[in-house]
Image (spheres, grey):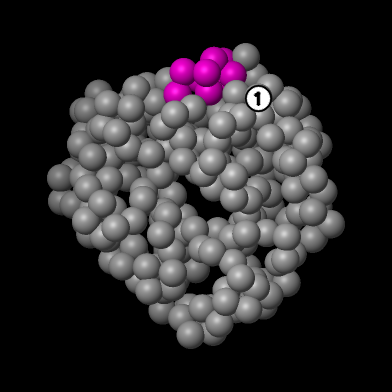
Amino acid sequence: MKLGTSIGPEGDLREKILDTPEEMEFIEFSIGEHERMPEDINSKKLKEALEEKDFDLVIHLPFRQRLVTEIDEFNEAVLDYHKRLIKFSEELGAEKFIVHADMRDNDSEKEEELIVEQIKKLDEIGENLDTEICFENIGHWNGLELFHLGEVLEELDASMCFDTGHAFSEVGQEEMGEFLEEFSHIISHLHLQDTREGRDMHLPIGSEEIDFKPVGKKLSDFNGTATMEIFTSENDYIRLSKKKVKEYF
C-alpha cells in the first residue's frame, strides 16, 4: 500500500509540498472551484517540488458541482469540465483521480438512474486518457447509499475510493466491516480519516471513534493507494497518523 497525505486549498502549493514529511509517497490535493484553480497553479514549480520530494500525485476532481442532475446539458458540461481538468493534471504527473459520486437531489429517482450512466461515462473518459478514476462514497450527503454504490461500481468494473469517515458516518462500524468484506476487491484508493458523532471531521487516525484494527484486517491484501485525509498542517499529527496506519494495516 502506498501512503500519502492531502494538502488543503490554503497557502502556497509548492511550499506545502516541500513542507510535507518525506515519509509520504504521494500527495493529494483538490482542483476546481474554491480549491486549487488550474490557472493559479505554476506547473513547472509544482513538478519541480514533486521531483525534489520524490512524491507521486493524486488529484481530487471538483466536488462543488454535483456529478449528476436531472438536466442533460449540465451533466455533459460536468463531464467536459472533468475531462479538461484530467488532461491538465496529467501534465503534472497525476495518474489517479478521485470523484464524489453525488447527485443534486438524492431523493430523485431519475438522478439515481442517471448517476450510473454518468459514472460509466466518466470512467470511460479516464480509460481513454490512460488514467484511473476512483468514485468516492458520500452516501451520508447526496451520494448513492454505500452498498448500492458498491454494486454499481462492481457491475461497471469501475474503481472505488473508500472514505472511512464517510462510511462510518453513514452506516457505522459494523456495516462498514460488512461492506469491506463484500466489496474490498473494487477499492483502489482509500481516504483514511477518523471522526466522531456521525460527522465528517477528518481527524488524525486513531484519535476518535473509528476502530481501524478490523478495517485493516479486512484490507490486509490491499495494494492500492491510501491518502491520510486529515485536515491539519502539523507534521507531527501526520507522522503519528502514519504510525497508526502501519499498526492497523
Q: Is 215 in front, or is 107?
A: 215
Q: Whole-percent x and y of residue 202? A: 67, 44
Identify which residue is drawn at 41% across, 32% down: 186
Q: For the magenta stretch, what is the residue range?
A: 175-183
Identify which residue is drawn at 57% across, 74% down: 50
Q: Whole-percent x and y of residue 61? A: 41, 56
Look at the image and tell me whether residue 226 can be seen: no
Circle 1: residue type: Lys
The total of numbered circles placed on residues is: 1
Residue closest to the far left: 72
Numbered disc 1: secondary structure: helix
Left or right placement of residue 29 versus residue 236 in this view: left
Quadrant of residue 119 within the rendered picture: top left
| Magenta-drawn stretch contains 245 | no
Identify which residue is drawn at 62% across, 14% down: 174
Which SS type dominates the magenta stretch? helix
Quadrant of residue 177 within the rendered picture: top right
Q: Is 41 in front, or is 161?
A: 161
> Is 217 drawn above or below residue 225 in the view shown?
above
Q: Which residue is mark 1?
A: 217
Q: Whole-percent x and y of residue 76? A: 18, 52
> Is 25 drawn above or below residue 119 in the view shown?
below
Identify which residue is drawn at 79% across, 60% down: 235
Left or right placement of residue 245 versus residue 179 in this view: right
Left or right placement of residue 18 versus residue 129 in this view: right
Left or right placement of residue 146 versus residue 105 in this view: right
Quadrant of residue 100 within the rendered picture: top left
Q: Whole-percent x and y of residue 34? A: 49, 63
Quarter of the image where the C terminus is located? top right
Q: Is 113 in front, or is 57?
A: 57
